[in-house]
Structure formats: C-alpha cells, structure tokens
Amino acid sequence: NAGVTQTPKFQVLKTGQSMTLQCAQDMNHNSMYWYRQDPGMGLRLIYYSASEGTTDKGEVPNGYNVSRLNKREFSLRLESAAPSQTSVYFCASSEGGGPDTQYFGPGTRLTVL
Amino acid sequence: KQEVTQIPAALSVPEGENLVLNCSFTDSAIYNLQWFRQDPGKGLTSLLLIQSSQREQTSGRLNASLDKSSGRSTLYIAASQPGDSATYLCAVRIGYSTLTFGKGTMLLVSP
C-alpha cells in the first residue's frame, strides 16, 4: 500500500520552462489537494479537487493549473515557471467526508533558476 | 481570514521531559483541528484529529486538547524521546476539506 506518491522528487527548471507534477493515491479517496511549502510561510493550498471531475482554487492558484485525470491521479502544471515558484510541493488526499484526515505525499522539491 | 499561530517556533529539551506545544487560531468556526508531524525532507504525517465537538484526543504518549471558544489547542508529549525530534504542525479545517496551517514548532529532543 503506497498511499500518496509524487513524481518527480526533485526538479530544476529555467525561468519560462513548463512542467507537470504528478500525484497518485491508492486509498480510493475522493478529494485531492496541492500545497506549496515555503520557509517562513507554512503550507498554503494551491488547488484542490473535492471529487473526480471537479477542481477549485485555493489560497495561491496564480501561475498553476491542475487536472483531475481520474479518481487516483491529480496533476499540477506550471505553464511558465518563475523563480517565485521555487518551493516544495506536496500532494495530499482524503476521503472527502467525516473527519477527513488528509494524507500527504513525500513532496517534490522544485527550483526555478 | 483564518490565521493559525504556533508557539514556540523552536524548542529544545532533554530526553524524558514532558512538553507542550501551543496552537492558536483566530476564527473559532472550525470543523476540526489536526496535528501533523514532519521529518526533515519528508511529507506530513497525521498524528491526531480533534472534531470541533470534542475536547481532546489521545494516541500513545500524545494528547491533544481543543478549546474552540478561546481559539486554542495544545499538543502534550509525555516522556519525550530523541525520535520525537521533528517539526509539529497544527492545521484547522475551516471549509470543505480546506486546511489552514500554522508555521510549525521545530522540536529537538537531545539524548
């Protein structure tokens, strides 16, 4: 049982390049989330998907797009990377009801030069 | 806007001590509160979740309390061990599945 997996673990981009961060969960969860974690700022929600086929903006959505590909997978795309997007990105999932504990992936460390 | 504050930002204690980590939030209209642990370079692991109708939750040496009216939660760690060294994050759920996080308390337990 892998839980929440993320690829890649590390990535270096040049300003203006694009990339997609992949996330998958094997817990049959309905809801999935993308966060970024920056020193001194804590974790901030970028986008979330309450259920398959729906996505909503979080606190810091600018510069990002998401796709809920199916119930298992939720991807985050940076169309034109900027140095301000240098961060650690975490994907999480939850059942989407009741206590709704969120389970986190190991993170992707992204550097934009 | 909900704000979550954690005090202290860092804490260093000798092994065996009991300790308390604090979390405060500005809007008491929360659905639940979670405590997470994060090891360096790793993701978050959920430790305890307290529903808004509950006062406390316990798991092993960990006890978390919630006083919703005053906007406060504490995480009590009994008989601390070096393996408890990590960053502890508090998060409140304020809407459908959205969490607002504090910046964390970095704990170091020395042998």
Image (tube, coloured by chain):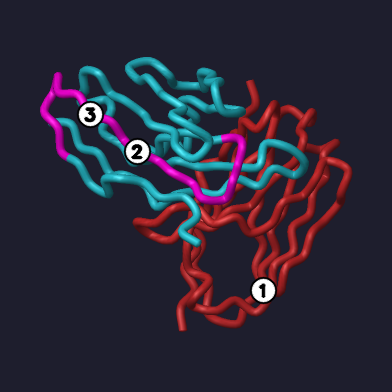
Chain colours: A cyan, B red
Three-letter code for the amino acid on which mark 2 is drawn: Gln
Looking at the rendered structure, the number of numbered marks drawn on it comes to 3
Decide: is A16 above or below A29.
above
The residue labelled by disc 2 is A22
- Do the residues marked 1 and 3 share a common chain? no
Host chain of mark 1: B
Three-letter code for the amino acid on which mark 3 is drawn: Met
Between residues B41 and A108, which one lies in front from this camera angle? A108
Disc 1 element: loop
Where is residue B50 drawn, in percent x and y?
77, 49
Relative placement, left or right, of A12 versus A28 is left
Query: Residue B18 shows which numbered tag?
Result: 1
Three-letter code for the amino acid on which mark 1 is drawn: Asn
- Do the residues marked 3 and 2 share a common chain? yes
Q: Quadrant of residue A16?
A: top left
Whole-Å distance between the Cαs marked 2 and 1?
40 Å
Host chain of mark 2: A
Residue furthest out toward the front: A70
Whole-Å distance between the Cαs marked 1 and 3?
46 Å
What range of the chain is rendered magenta? A12-31
Relative placement, left or right, of A82 versus A28 is left
Decide: is A113 above or below A54.
below
The residue labelled by disc 3 is A19
Disc 2 element: strand
Whole-Å distance between the Cαs marked 3 and 2?
10 Å
